[in-house]
Image (cartoon, grey):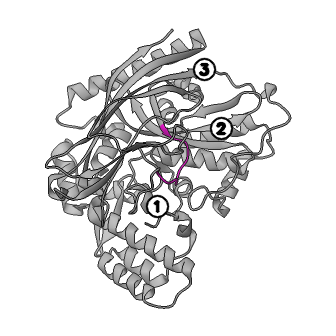
């Protein structure tokens, strides 16, 4: 409905911001409607229409826990946890919070985020999930064995099979109504070939072109009770191993994939200052890209995020707050590269292994004569924090084979287009679900992805 997010760069009226920052979302919506009822410039109108949707998303269930509820969660899970510790975590921006009606509320995954990112707190968890602990250890071994394989063989090819599903939660199920559903599938790309749809439920209405920037299968039907939409597919995936040598860089470099893309890939004054500080007098693209990668992986703390749609400029948010998840970190790396004349672009989809399958984002950058190579700042950052320098270095230039790339760009329309604003209008890894008169948020959906099989190919 309001897919042109570039209007998010337009400033909001001061009174809307006052109400939003205080957490008076009803008041902010009323103020927005007051402005929309007047004869205002079209750019401001579009910005306010987008902001109305943002406030709806933030105010629904992104920040459900009061201060007292958050303290109870921490106290019931961690040994000898004290109130002053929660206050400290809030004060140092370790626990994400906002005001709702003037009172502090914490983000829905604040506890999981703290346990994931702060080993001192993780060590105090009273009931440790042994399966999770063993699974994390196995994940690291899997990544390290892939690195060893890549270095020994110069590359790796796998044949992967995945099943994805989406359905409305029972309370948002409107049986008998027409529904339009999209599920992501692999985009045919330099890494991906031989994509085949193996099964679906119900019958697929249409399939986006192989080179669609955000590729999906599309369903259109009347909703049945407890109906689940499913697609199962297979594909071949290949990546080469590369060691980037600054001395082998060509004197001539290409000039594509260097543009800004409002509101998120923006060369803001702060990001220009950061780029200049990191770059100094250096001009070699490999050295520059490595400096940007090192900054993101060593200075930005991994953090679960609210919906991307609610952030005005993602890379600037990352650089200012020095926290963010995989996509937030990737967009900062991409933006710094583009500002420096290094072509860079987005990739996202799934990270898929036998231990875990879920959403993931990463980046590519181009250096002649190597061509397009990869950078995964969040995987690199976790390796750096674990003291694994080999894996940290690997994810500058290289990628593992445990991926399903469905998206090559952000902020692109589906084929066919969605009628209503998407749950995630920036990216697509989980799918989208809408009725004829409104769409559903991810809090109103059940989404699941599963790796069926992955086999090495000769």
Task: Residue 394: give x, y in percent of width and height.
Answer: 57, 25
**Disc nearer the start of the sequence (1/3):** 3
**Disc nearer the start of the sequence (2/1):** 1
**Which residue is outermost to the right?**
251
Along the viewing direction, whichever of 298 and 139 lies nearer the viewer: 139
- Is 281 magenta? The answer is no
Magenta-highlighted stretch: main secondary structure?
Answer: loop
The answer to whether residue 118 of the structure is visible from this angle is no
Q: Which disc number belongs to residue 365?
A: 2
Q: Which range is magenta?
A: 406-414
Task: Residue 47: give x, y in percent of width and height.
Answer: 50, 74
Distance CA(mark 3)–CA(mark 2): 15 Å
Along the viewing direction, whichever of 213 and 402 lies nearer the viewer: 213
Q: Which disc number belongs to residue 311?
A: 1
Q: Say which residue label 3 marks.
A: 240
In the rendered image, the vertical position of residue 63 relative to residue 197, given as above or below? below
In the rendered image, the vertical position of residue 101 relative to residue 184, given as above or below? below
* Residue occupying the point 26% across, 40% down: 202
Along the viewing direction, whichever of 144 and 54 lies nearer the viewer: 54
**Disc nearer the start of the sequence (3/2):** 3
Distance CA(mark 2)–CA(mark 1): 24 Å
Give the image quarter of residue 166.
Answer: top left
239 to the left or right of 143: right
User: Is disc 1 in contact with disc 3, using a CB cutoff of under 8 Å?
Assistant: no
Mark 1, Cα crowd under 10 Å, few <14 / some 14-19 / many 20+, is: some
In the rendered image, the vertical position of residue 115 relative to residue 16, given as above or below? above
* Residue occupying the point 73% across, 52% down: 276
Query: Number of numbered discs present?
Result: 3
Distance CA(mark 1)–CA(mark 3): 35 Å
Task: Residue 380: give x, y in percent of width and height.
Answer: 52, 33
In the rendered image, the vertical position of residue 183 relative to residue 158, given as above or below? below
């Amino acid at each position: 409905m309001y897919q042109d997010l570039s209007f998010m760069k337009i400033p909001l009226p001061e009174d809307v911001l006052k109400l939003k920052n205080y957490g008076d979302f009803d008041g902010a919506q009323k103020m927005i409607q007051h402005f929309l009822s007047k004869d205002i410039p079209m750019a401001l109108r579009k910005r306010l229409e987008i902001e109305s949707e943002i406030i709806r998303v933030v105010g629904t269930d992104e920040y459900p826990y009061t201060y007292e509820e958050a303290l109870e969660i921490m106290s019931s899970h961690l040994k000898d946890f004290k109130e002053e510790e929660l206050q400290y975590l809030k004060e140092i921006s370790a626990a994400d919070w906002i005001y709702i009606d003037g009172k502090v509320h914490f983000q829905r995954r604040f506890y999981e985020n703290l346990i994931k990112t702060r080993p001192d707190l993780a060590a105090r968890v009273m009931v440790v999930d042994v399966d999770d602990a063993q699974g994390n250890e196995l994940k690291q071994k899997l990544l390290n064995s892939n690195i060893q394989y890549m270095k020994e063989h110069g590359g790796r090819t796998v044949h992967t099979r995945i099943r994805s599903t989406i359905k409305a939660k029972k309370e948002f199920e409107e049986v008998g109504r027409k529904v339009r559903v999209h599920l992501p599938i692999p985009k045919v790309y330099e890494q991906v070939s031989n994509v085949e749809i193996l099964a679906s439920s119900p019958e697929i209405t249409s399939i986006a072109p192989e080179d669609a920037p955000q590729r999906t299968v599309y369903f259109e039907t009347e909703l049945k009770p407890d109906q689940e939409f499913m697609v199962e597919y297979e594909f071949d995936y290949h990546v080469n191993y590369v060691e980037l040598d600054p001395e082998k860089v060509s004197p001539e470099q290409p000039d594509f994939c260097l543009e800004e893309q409002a509101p998120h890939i923006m060369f803001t004054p702060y990001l220009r200052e950061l780029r200049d500080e990191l770059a100094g007098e250096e001009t070699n693209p490999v050295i520059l890209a490595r400096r940007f990668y090192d900054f993101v992986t060593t200075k930005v703390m991994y953090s679960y995020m609210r919906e991307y749609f609610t952030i005005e400029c993602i890379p600037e948010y990352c650089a200012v707050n020095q926290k963010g998840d995989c996509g937030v970190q990737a967009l900062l790396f991409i933006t710094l590269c583009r500002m420096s004349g290094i072509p860079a672009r987005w990739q996202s989809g799934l990270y898929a292994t036998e231990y875990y399958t879920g959403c993931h984002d990463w980046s590519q950058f181009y250096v002649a004569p190597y061509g397009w190579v990869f950078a995964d700042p969040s995987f690199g950052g976790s390796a750096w924090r674990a003291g694994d320098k080999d894996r940290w270095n690997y994810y500058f230039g290289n990628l593992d084979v445990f991926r399903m790339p469905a998206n090559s760009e952000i902020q692109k329309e589906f084929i066919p287009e969605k009628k209503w604003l998407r749950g995630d209008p920036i990216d697509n890894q989980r799918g989208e679900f809408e009725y004829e008169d409104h769409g559903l948020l991810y809090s109103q959906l059940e989404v699941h992805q599963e790796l069926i099989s992955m086999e090495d190919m000769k």
